[in-house]
Image (cartoon, rainbow, N blue to C red):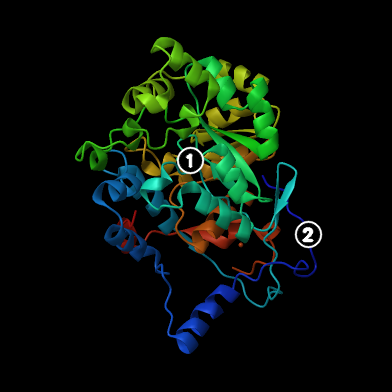
Amino acid sequence: MPRVQEHSDHPEGGRKYGAFQTEIYKDGLLNQKLPTVTTDPNKLEEQARKFLGVRSFNYVAGGAGEKATMDANRLAFRQWKMIPRMLRPTTHRDLRVELFGQTFESPLLIAPIGVQTIFHQDKEIGVAEIAREIGVPYILSTASSSSIEEVAEANGDGTRWFQLYWPQDNEITKSCVLLSPKLLRRAKNNGYRVLIVTLDTWALAWRPADLDNAYVPFASGIGDQTGFSDPVFRAKFAQKHNNKTPEDDIFLASREWEADVFSGAAHTWEDLELIKAEWDGPVVLKGIQHVDDAKKAVEMGMHGIVVSNHGGRQLDGAIGSLEVLPEIVDAVGDKLTVLFDSGVRTGVDVIKDLDQSMGLAGIKTIADCNRSMVRRVQYGGDTISSH
């Protein structure tokens, strides 16, 4: 688990996150200015629907099958209740954690989300810029609509990691993990520190919201920038198609990139040896939900795992990620770094996650997290999910 720095007082220059609430009230009272984005997590989806096109909204909001896994993620959080403690020295709170040798101001990361150009014209570079401003590490998706260089420039002196959708072609994999001679220099110059290998998306799921509109962005080149800019993919494409570039035939290039990245053919644990040989930094496996797989990750020499079901977008009817987090932490939490996603919507959700995984309610530092501060209680209303 992330190691935590102990501090007697709020760290010098630390961010005062509570000031954001004060700013909202101040802007409203003095400038008649309301928040652009709703502060109500249960209204975010409704607001997004108003501003996004149907295809874009369905792509980001949709899940696998009947969305049972999405429901499970939210219900898992709803069924754990905070047990607050009082009269503790919590005036100055320190949220800093250490991950892979770096200290961060909070335990939050921006998860890898691809094809952001269908949501906003600023694409991934806009989010990467904001990530730097607020001190949160940014994880770039393989399915990005911005280039590695563009994101690095926008992120500046921020922290950035790279997420890999694992191609079947080993030569392209080597290039994607940025260790061919040319791309090794590219990686070092652009400062991506940690490799996140996504395990649960070697084939796209059955997603009715996309299927009903016959829409997948990758088919038209959206989110294929990593492949189209990759020298190995470009060379093989040119050799196969009479010196064509991906830009000469977007649809053909898209099909070939998809066929390799979302091939329908699964990798094996033994294939991780290639990743280890071709990446000289921390390697984290994303998509772990079983204790035995977590133990296998330790055996294979991984530096970390992400307990995740892809936010319910890949396998319908799966268990909520929070349900399995405690047993996975108990099994391997002292051997590698355990990260978490799927179902998180609020700050309280983050606290519940940390309570389960670091085993906060009268919390001064992240080190104070423990399971005595939450209890599993199911009320009648908890059977309703807000996704």
Q: Which residue was labeled with disc 2?
A: 6
Residue at image x 41%, y 70%? 36
Quadrant (top left, top right, bottom left, bottom right) of the N terminus? top right
Outermost residue, bottom side: 30
Depicted 182 relative to depicted 106: above or below: above
Residue at image x 44%, y 31%? 200
Q: Nearer the viewer, residue 39 or 149?
A: 149
Q: Amino acid at mark 2?
A: Glu
Horizontal side of residue 138 vs 145, given as left or right: right
CB under 8 Å between callouts 2 and 1?
no
The answer for how far apart the CA atoms under marks 2 and 1 are is 29 Å
Choose top left, top right, bottom left or bottom right for residue 256.
Answer: top left
The label shown at residue 308 is 1
Q: Nearer the viewer, residue 93 or 256?
A: 256
Q: Position of residue 365 (x, y in %)?
A: 69, 62
Choose top left, top right, bottom left or bottom right for residue 145.
Answer: top left
Depicted 73 relative to depicted 291: above or below: below
Outermost residue, left side: 212
Q: Is residue 359 visible?
A: no
Horizontal side of residue 374 vs 13, given as left or right: left
Depicted 144 relative to depicted 134: above or below: above
Q: Position of residue 110 (x, y in %)?
A: 54, 50
